[in-house]
Image: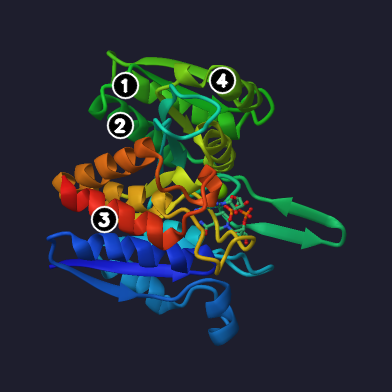
Amino acid sequence: MIKITTIPGDGIGKEVISSGIAILENLDLNMDFKEAAAGEECFKKTGTTIPEETIKMAKNADATLFGANTSVPGEKSPILTLRQSLDLYANIRPVKSYAGVNSLFDNVNFIIVRENTEGLYCQVESLLDDKTIAQRRITRKASERISNSAFKIAKHYKKETVTCVHKSNVLKKTDGIFKDSFYKIAKNYPNIKTNDFYVDAMAMYLVTNPEKFDVIVSTNLFGDILSDEAAGLVGGLGLLPSGNLGDKKGLFEGVHGSAPDIAGKNIANPIATILSIAMMLDFLKEDYYGNKIKTSVENILKQGKIKTPDLGGKNTTKEMTEAIINEINSL
Ligand code: NAI
Ligand code: MG
């Protein structure tokens, strides 16, 4: 029995998780789903955005499927808390152009590997009179292990180059360590090419030559910003999946947030979540089904008959989900 904890959260999180469960229930897998609460709605009911029970359920599961949360001002972010509590240090975000999708580029295929536990997202801020300070914690340990993840991914997917993105000309100490750690780990992977860019230059290269990149490794905030930029290159946030991986645990989620502008309308694109499920199945060593899901999504996008509004169509979340289920069953 594979134990999955689901955390639908807020807004479109609920809609895309219910699509995801429909996809999984249709597969011939012995899975048990347990739902846990987190987010704004949970805060209104319980006074906390992330109950201890939710963290415990994520720790006890074989994998966790996360929808999205609406931020509550002044309160802890559930997803950041989960990443930190479960030590899910590597945020893996594959970015790919799909045939049939109207996008800026049709030849993009890279993977963003974002450090997930520290940097500016360590959630340590202080306020003294009118002076506010946010801590940007960068350790050698976390920098080396995220670089190691990036090189391991490059090796696994037979990618040629790993690119380190930082701002060490300004953040000399913190990003100095990040960049040094990258080149230290690179020595263990002599067959993989390396380069590094400042994050501002990288933001430009991503819109001028995105096809040149294979694997991109960066700190928490830069990785987050570049991910949304990358989504814009290939058809939007409705298509970008992600995995948050530690040494043993995995939590999977679309890159997008709770999208209050389209929530509750049954029009969110469930593909980001469905591709995250494919990543989850690979992680659970059920890659036969992971591959089936990826192929089905590719086929549906290529056929272009069913499109949610973000892809230029008029179909609903449910119609897209059903089309993908039918495609999976026809393979
Ligand atoms: P967002 O990712 O929710 O939405 C950005 C834009 O992309 C919106 O126009 C939205 O309609 C569109 N979009 C996102 N996902 C889509 C999908 N699956 N299908 C079609 N269109 C989609 O980011 P935004 O608006 O900045 O944040 C909304 C809330 O979500 C905020 O409270 C924010 O803090 C939170 N958030 C939560 C995250 C998480 O739970 N992991 C990640 C990012 C934001
Ligand atoms: Mg983000």
Where 104 falls versus 4 (above or below)? above
Left or right: where 128 falls relative to 212:
right
Q: Earlier in the sequence, mark 1 or mark 4?
A: 1
* Foreground of the two, 179 or 15: 15
Question: Can residue 213 be seen in the rendering of this structure?
Answer: yes
Q: Residues within 10 Å of mark 2 (few under 14, many from 20)?
A: some
The mark found on residue 325 in the picture is 3
| Residue at image location 36% in from the left, 21% down from the top | 186
Q: Quadrant of the N terminus?
A: bottom left
| Residue at image location 26% in from the left, 72% down from the top | 33
- Quickly name the residue at label 2: 153
Q: Earlier in the sequence, mark 3 or mark 4?
A: 4
Question: Can residue 89 be seen in the rendering of this structure?
Answer: no
- Quickly name the residue at label 4: 197
- Quickly name the residue at label 1: 159
User: Where does the image place residue 226, in percent across and percent down from the top left?
Assistant: 56, 35
User: Where does the image place residue 310, in percent across and percent down from the top left?
Assistant: 55, 47
Give the spatial CA distance, label 1 vs label 4: 18 Å
* Residue type beneath disc 4: Phe
Q: Earlier in the sequence, mark 2 or mark 3?
A: 2
Q: Secondary structure at mark 4?
A: strand
Q: Secondary structure at mark 3?
A: helix
Q: Secondary structure at mark 1?
A: loop
* Residue type beneath disc 2: Ile
